[in-house]
Image (cartoon, rainbow, N blue to C red):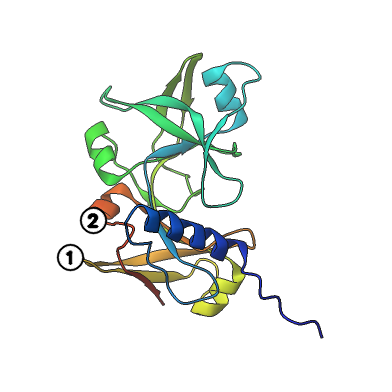
Amino acid sequence: MAAKSSIPNRAVIEQMVRASVYAKAGRPAPTTVAGPNPLLVNVSARHCHLSPEAVEALFGKGHELTPMKWLYQDGQYAAKESVTLVGPRSRVISNLRILGPCRPLNQVELAYTDGISLGFDIPLRASGEIEGTPGCMLMGPNGFFKMEQGVIRALRHVHMHPDDAEFYGVKHKDMMRLKIGGPCAISLDEMLVRVDPSFKLEVHIDTDEGNACNLRPDTPVELVK
C-alpha cells in the first residue's frame, strides 16, 4: 500500500497563500472550518451568464469573452466585458459584469434590492432554474439582446467536492445552514448544497446578505447540517 502523500492539496495551498497576503497587510486571514478543505464565504455581486449567441449579438460576430479575473472555482472568471441591463421601468444597471465561460442559457443574477430599484419581481431560484422567470433587455457596444426569461435572485449555496460532502454528511441538493459570527451575527438557513468533483468548498451569498452581516475576511463562519 502506498504511503499517503504529505503534500497539501491545491485548496490548502491557496488558503496558505491568502493567509500570508493578509498577514503582510496586517489583517486577519479569512476564517476556515476544520475539514478536508478550507471554507471560504464570498459575496457574489450582481452579474450575468451568457450564451455564445448572446455574446455575439452584444459584442459582434465571432467575439469571445476575455478573462479579466479568475475566480475561486477552477475555470471560472470575471470577463472584461460588461453590459447594460434595462429594466421594466426603463431604469438601468450599467457595467453588469459577465462571468465566463459562456453557458448554454442566459441568466442574470441580482440582489433583492436591485430588483426593487429596477421594478422586477425577482424569484428566488437555484442557478439554471429559470423557467417562468422575468426577462430583460441587455445592451452592449454592438447591439441589444432580449432575454425572454432568466432574471433571478440566486439561492444562497455552497459548492462542495465529494470529500467535503462526506465530511459534512450531506448530498447534492441538500440544505444546510451558515452561521456567521461577529457584531452583526446572523444565521442563513436554506443553504443549497451543490456537489461536484470539480468544486472547491465555497459559499456564495449575495450583496444584501453580505451587507446584513457585515461580512469581512476575519468574520467567523460555520456550516452546519
Secondary structure of residue under mark 1: loop
Seen in the picture, residue 74 relative to 108 is either above or below; the reply is: below
**Label at residue 134:** none
Q: Is residue 95 visible?
A: yes
Q: Residues within 10 Å of mark 1 (few under 14, many from 20)?
A: few
The Cα–Cα distance between marks 1 and 2, rounded to whole angstroms, is: 8 Å
- Helix, strand or loop at label 2? It is loop
Q: Is residue 152 left or right of residue 143?
A: left
Give the residue type at disc 2: Asn
Task: Tell whether label 2 touches label 1 (CB within 8 Å).
Answer: yes
Q: Amino acid at mark 1?
A: Pro
The answer to whether residue 156 is seen in the rendering is: no
From this viewpoint, which residue is outermost toward the front? 24
Task: State left or right for residue 5 relative to residue 193.
Answer: right
Classify the position of the C terminus by image quarter.
Answer: bottom left
The quadrant in which residue 151 appears is: top left
Front residue of 11 and 119: 11
Where does the image place residue 187, in percent across and percent down from the top left? Answer: 27, 68
Residue 18: x and y in percent read 46, 57
Foreground pick, 65 / 174: 65
Q: Residue furthest bottom?
A: 1
Q: Nearer the viewer, residue 205 or 34?
A: 34
Give the labeled residue for mark 2. Answer: 214
Q: Residue at x 32, y 56 (%)?
A: 26
Specify the farthest residue to the right: 1
Density class for disc 2 (Cα within 10 Å; few <14, some 14-19, many ≥20) is some
Q: Quadrant of residue 21?
A: bottom left
Residue under the image location 57 percent in, 78 percent down: 166
x and y, in percent, of residue 1 in the image: 82, 86
At 48% across and 70% down in the image, what residue appears? 174
Label annotation for residue 183: 1
Where residue 154 sits in the image (x, y, percent)?
40, 50
